Image (cartoon, rainbow, N blue to C red):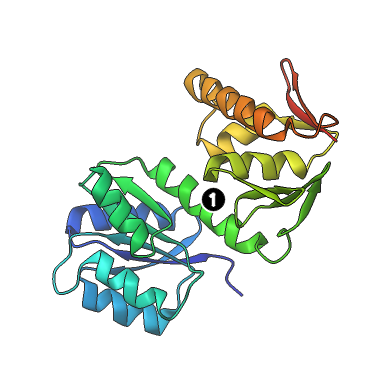
Amino acid sequence: MSSKITLLLAEDEPSLGHIVKESLETRDFEVFHAVDGEEAWQLYTEKQPEVLVLDVMMPKKDGFTLAREIRAHDAQIPIIFLTAKSQTKDVLEGFQHGGNDYLKKPFSMEELIVRIHALLDRVKIKNDHSNIAIGAFAFDYPKQTLEIDGTSILLTHREAALLFHLSQKKNEILDRSFILQKLWGNDDFFNARSMDVFISKLRKKLQVDPDIQILNIRGYGYKLIC
């Protein structure tokens, strides 16, 4: 039985579609490539892929319309939009039509692959990790919330992902390089500084419970104490 991740790529630009398809296929993906929205819908119904990567501007049926129709059948399948547009209103429109993520062209394949795996991870753990105890908090990773004493604290996608990995290594060291590769795509200096900022944000949100600490283990990583 194949262990490849099945993915529907809807991209009408032939050269880009070919590059993305070949690159993903070298990373254990099975890719079904459509060149317009109608072909993408047909492949979706026939192949039932695990994840969708949709260009926004396509002939016959645009990516937003396609995503809206697919969402009527499947509320969980991860959808990533590819687009040359980057204005806030365009991004918001994408999320309103059921998108989970939004990648502006040109993009790196490494970033696309990291985002795909992050979305698949969230779907995979939805049923098993909807109520993780962190001190006095109940952490719902799929909903990206922390609950304490009837109060709900909303987390960003990256805050939730980072806290999830910390929670899976409670009272143990979470390797710095591992989490940078997992969530940021590489462990360079700038991404490391970005992660430090997200750690600080999590500390502020968790400070309601004084028994919770996120320790910086210099040279190794972070440790969630609770």
**Left or right of 114 on screen, residue 16:** left
Coordinates of residue 194 in the picture (x, y in percent):
52, 25
The residue at 48%/20% (across/down) is 190
Q: Amino acid at mark 1?
A: Ala
How crowded pointer 1 is (Cα within 10 Å; few <14, some 14-19, many 20+) is rated as some
Within the image, what quadrant is residue 134 found in?
top right
Q: Residue furthest front?
A: 150
| Depth order, front residue of 38/141 | 141
The residue at 65%/63% (across/down) is 126
| Depth order, front residue of 89/104 | 89
Q: Quadrant of the C terminus?
A: top right
Coordinates of residue 224 in the picture (x, y in percent):
78, 33
Residue bearing mark 1: 118
Q: Residue furthest left?
A: 59
The residue at 24%/43% (across/down) is 86
Coordinates of residue 157 in the picture (x, y in percent):
53, 45
Q: Quadrant of the N terminus?
A: bottom right
Coordinates of residue 131 in the picture (x, y in percent):
75, 57
**Left or right of 72 on screen, residue 4:** right
Residue 188 visible in this rendered orientation of the protein: yes
In this rendering, is residue 112 above or below 43?
Answer: above
Mark 1 element type: helix
**Left or right of 199 on screen, residue 72:** left
Residue 21 visible in this rendered orientation of the protein: no
**Left or right of 209 on screen, residue 57:** left
The residue at 67%/60% (across/down) is 125
Count how many numbered circles sit on residues in the image. Answer: 1
In this rendering, is residue 183 above or below 123?
Answer: above
